[in-house]
Image (cartoon, rainbow, N blue to C red):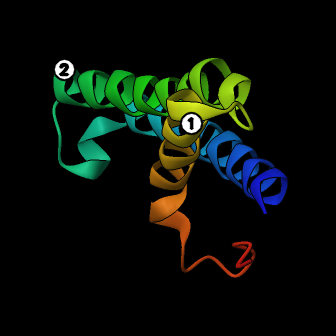
Amino acid sequence: MTDALVAFLRARLDEQLEKARFASSTVAKVPERFGVDPEQAAAHARFSVATAEVHLALLEDTVIPHLGAGGAAGRTAEYQLRLLAAPYVEHKDYPHD
């Protein structure tokens, strides 16, 4: 289950980053179309991309290296993996056991 969940989550987070970059680019080009001023559009764009990048970094740098480890480190990594995957639990491809 853990390997399947890692693969699933990695794919979702990659998608999220791609969507954030696309949306950021689109909104930044024509912010008035979305009812926001250029500064708000730029700030939101940076925030969306940064959030996606941070989630990927957490998965790759702090969760995956400790999965399967014994003791507290392994339990914490498993918990963090499930937390990161939680928003996607209703996704059609979510690996349920």
* Quadrant, the C terminus: bottom right
Query: Residue at left 48%, top 24%?
Result: 54
Q: In which quarter of the image is residue 96?
A: bottom right
User: Which residue in the rendered view is the most extreme toward the front?
Assistant: 71
Query: Residue at left 49%, top 37%?
Result: 76
Ranked by sequence position, the earlier of labels 2 and 1 is: 2
- The image's mark for residue 77 is 1
**Percent of width and height locating residue 43:** 25, 22
Q: In which quarter of the image is residue 65?
A: top right
The answer to whether the residue labelled 2 contacts the one labelled 1, judged by CB atoms less than 8 Å apart, is no
Q: Label 1 neighbourhood size at 10 Å, few (<14), some (14-19), many (20+)? A: many
Query: Residue at left 43%, top 22%?
Result: 50
**Percent of width and height locating residue 34:** 27, 50
Relative to 65, is 24 above or below? below
Q: Label 2 neighbourhood size at 10 Å, few (<14), some (14-19), many (20+)? A: few
Indicate left or right for 5 with 45 as reference: right
Q: Which of 4 and 87 is in front in this view?
A: 4
Query: Residue at left 67%, top 33%?
Result: 70
Q: Element at badge 1?
A: helix
Q: Mark 2 points at which residue?
A: 39
The amino acid type, in three-letter code, at marker 1 is: Ala
The amino acid type, in three-letter code, at marker 2 is: Glu
Relative to 56, is 87 above or below? below
Q: Which of 91 and 30 is in front in this view?
A: 91
